[in-house]
Amino acid sequence: MQLTVAITNNGTDGAARSFTQLLQVYKGTFGEAHLRNRRGILELAGAIRCTTGRSPFAYLRYGCYCGLGGKGWPKDRVDWCCFHHDCCYGRAEQAGCQPKTESYHWECKDNSAVCDSLEDKCQKMACECDREAAKCFSKAPYHRKYLLWPDFLCGEIQPL
């Protein structure tokens, strides 16, 4: 099942409200328990907003690796950021963590996500993955043509 949602919301906290509204639609479609298990995505969304100034929606279905899943060869530097973020989450999972659902405390300082005060290994790993992805996004040129890129154009050959 594919779900496409477009929500616009003006105001200083618009991105957070929009993302919460998207999660409400997500919850209604896939159930309460599934939403509870995706809490950690809010931290990633916040780190993206803090570091890039962009809405997290800009990266929700970008290229071949931004969003759920991923296959093929990354399309550009933004897509490579998502590929590396997926790999980072994979390393955290190998260490026994659940980075996709890990909630953690972080702060936005000087357009950077900061999680230095975390002591829990899994929270720290999840935060570092999200922080590095957001930092990578901030340095990579964004190409609108890769937003909502169809999976069938990603191919099967992928980096190791």
Image: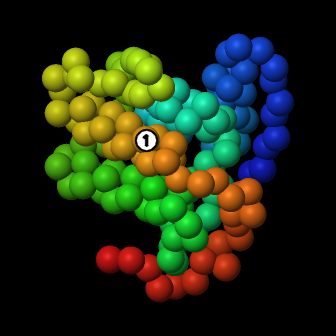
103 sits left or right of 124 in the view: right
Q: Is residue 67 above or below residue 56?
A: below
Q: Is residue 147 above or below residue 72?
A: above
Q: Is residue 111 visible?
A: yes
Q: Residue at point 69% right, 63% down?
A: 146
Q: Identify the element where label 1 is drawn.
A: helix
In this view of the protein, which residue sits in the foreground, 144 or 85? 144
Which of the 4 image quadrants contains residue 132?
top left
Quadrant of the frame with the N terminus: bottom right
Residue 34 location (% of width, % of height): 53, 39
Crowding near the residue tagged with mark 1, few <14, some 14–19, many ≥20 C-alpha atoms within 10 Å:
many
108 sits left or right of 65 in the view: left
Q: Residue at point 61% right, 48% down?
A: 59
Q: Which residue is mark 1?
A: 135
145 sits left or right of 139 in the view: right
Q: Residue at point 25% right, 48% down?
A: 92
Q: Is residue 107 above or below residue 77?
A: above
Residue 55 location (% of width, % of height): 66, 35
